[in-house]
Amino acid sequence: MTGSTDAHLARVSAVESLLVAAGRDRRPGSPLNMPLVLASNFVLGTERAYARDDGTPTWEALEEIVGLLEQGQSVAFASGMAAIAAVFDQLHAGSRIALPDDCYQGVAGLAESGRQKGLWSVIRLAGDDTDGWIRACADCDLIWLESPSNPMLVVADLRSICSAPRKPSALLAVDNTFATSLNQQPLDLGADISMQSATKFIGGHSDLLAGMVTVRRDDIFASLRHSRELRGATPGALESFLAVRGARTLALRLERAQANAMILAERLSLHPGVECARYPGLTTHPTHAIARAQMKGFGTIISFDVRGGAVAADAVCSRLRLVQHATSLGAVESTIERRASIPGQEHLPPSLLRLSVGIENVEDIWGDLDAALRGRG
Ligand SMILES: *Cc1c(COP(=O)(O)O)cnc(C)c1O
């Protein structure tokens, strides 16, 4: 317990304020910021004995913030993948899993490794195949959605899919990493589980790994905690501290980066060096209407195909000066990567670059992209 009781948050209604106000110990004399608690064990006599089982105040500060953002209960994990693995840990032998055909490669890899071991079967569906997902809800045990998807930015119709009848024991989970809790609320749309990699937007500075799962059902919450305890998938102390630090500025960072992304997506879609630009905020984006109906903002990730194929796209990356040639996303700095160059991602368009737009001045980012696309080093 962090001590930031309901009373202290009673006048807080907006997410921007919650990000700043939650996860603090409000008792007189407490440090204003939740300290970096380095402890594996605690003096016996309360419910907190051992960190792996019972958590630490630093992890709980992070869990409180994300839980309040999505009006549920959050469990923090060592990484986004550890969070995803804990959800898969809920499945019984012989389960059926539905997965988008465009999704984070780690979740596809985890599903495939379990399939090869005979633990479960996997079907893959296009993110925008709403009817296919509705059918999958009727007979799958885990319906795993990712919206917008990585890196094709397909937006799934979460409201329709989540309201389709599903088996009583089935779990419907949404990877909310690209959207963030500020832009999209999967639990409000009817999902059982909202997962996000805190490595990305919550951390926001490319300096930590952490993952979050948020739920509203007590039984799933207890079971996820139990999985974390048994698998030892606990978040790091410093990482949790840094994630809380990151969360304080999430709303501001997202607001700026998202405004930048809209401007850049429009300009990229008109650039002679670009074949096609994908961004859910573009009215020409195939799933724009769904994005508009279920998201508050369209995020900070753009993917675009460079004219001239993989060689031309690699050359663009090598000519950039401000935008960092690096993987990952959601940080203050803009990063770019040719996704098909990653082992296992060869099925993607060869010249697709995934751009994570940062908080730099938009004209500086544009100047860098435009120069690189025009062949200037
Ligand atoms: C990065 C990412 C993950 C995995 O998170 P890690 O913190 O790297 O383990 C899962 N889903 C999406 C969409 C991601 O971008």
Image (spheres, rainbow, N blue to C red):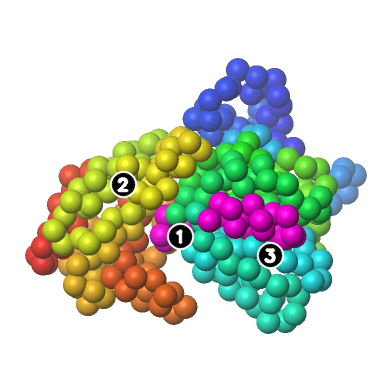
Q: Mark 1: give few (<14), some (14-19) or many (20+) Cα within 10 Å.
A: some
Nearer mark to the viewer, of 1 and 2: 2
Label 1: which residue? 150
Residue visible at 47% across and 42% down? 290
Q: CA distance from mark 1 to mark 3?
A: 19 Å
What amino acid is found at the position of numbered circle 2 in the picture?
Thr
- Specify whether 184 is left or right of 22: left
- Look at the numbered disc 1 and give the secondary structure of its residue: loop
Nearer mark to the viewer, of 1 and 3: 3
Tell me where the magenta segment starts and ends, as one range.
129-153
Residue visible at 73% across and 55% down? 138
Q: CA distance from mark 3 to mark 2?
A: 32 Å
- Does 195 sit above or below residue 34? below
Label 2: which residue? 284
Q: CA distance from mark 1 to mark 2?
A: 19 Å
- Look at the numbered disc 3 and give the secondary structure of its residue: strand
